[in-house]
Image (spheres, rainbow, N blue to C red):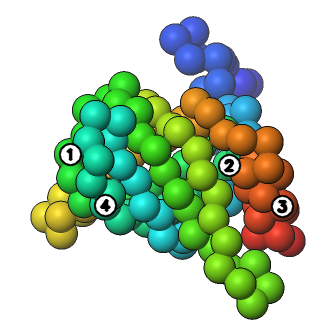
Amino acid sequence: MDKTNRNNPSVSQTKMGVLSIEKRKYPRFFVELPLNYSRAERKDTLGGMVANASEGGLLVYLPEKIEIGSLLKIEIFYVRGLELDTIKAVAKVVWCDLAARESWGEHRYGLQFQYIDQNDFSRLSTLLKEVGN
């Protein structure tokens, strides 16, 4: 007999345990891509790493603490054929995990795209389709 958790309808309890179904608007793809970013209020550019990506946002590792709600100008680097290409966007920090690798000087963040040019979005979609195959 399955029971649905009243607090979270995506969690179902069975006699064998708890089943949690993740609900995402866009599928995520594991990648390892370098990125540069700058905060809206600062001019300096820092580097980071994209750990997974979707058409809605990114999971990134960055070298500094950033407040939730901060806007970042980002540039993701990837190889297309024999050439280096980039995807540029503006993203908002929507969550952070301060415990993740902080001892190594890395902080994990969830970024949600706020603005991405149609050409950059097309390149992102193509890249994710290639990674997914």
- Give residue 101's quadrant in the image: bottom left
Tell me the mark number nearer the camera, choosing from 1 and 4.
Answer: 4
In the displayed structure, does residue 76 sit left or right of residue 9? left
Q: Quadrant of the C terminus?
A: bottom right
Ranked by sequence position, the earlier of labels 1 and 3 is 1
Does residue 103 appear in the picture of this structure?
A: yes
Identity of the residue furthest to the bottom in this view: 82
Identity of the residue furthest to the left in this view: 103
Which residue is painted at 26% across and 42% down in the image?
Answer: 42
Could you give the CA–CA distance between mark 1 and mark 3, rounded to whole angstroms? Answer: 31 Å
Could you give the CA–CA distance between mark 2 and mark 4, rounded to whole angstroms? Answer: 22 Å
Ranked by sequence position, the earlier of labels 1 and 4 is 4
Query: Which residue is the site of mark 2?
Result: 54
Query: Which residue is the site of mark 1?
Result: 65
Whether residues under marks 2 and 4 lie with C-beta atoms below 8 angstroms apart, the answer is no
> SS at mark 2?
loop
Q: Label 2 crowding class (10 Å Cα cut-off): few <14, some 14-19, many 20+?
A: some
Which residue is painted at 83% across and 70% down in the image?
Answer: 130
- Classify 116 as above or below 61: above
Query: Which residue is the site of mark 4?
Result: 46
Q: At which x and y percent is residue 37?
A: 40, 53
Q: Label 4 crowding class (10 Å Cα cut-off): few <14, some 14-19, many 20+?
A: some
Could you give the CA–CA distance between mark 2 and mark 3, rounded to whole angstroms? Answer: 11 Å
> SS at mark 3?
helix
Ranked by sequence position, the earlier of labels 1 and 2 is 2
Ranked by sequence position, the earlier of labels 4 and 3 is 4
Query: Which residue is the site of mark 3?
Result: 126
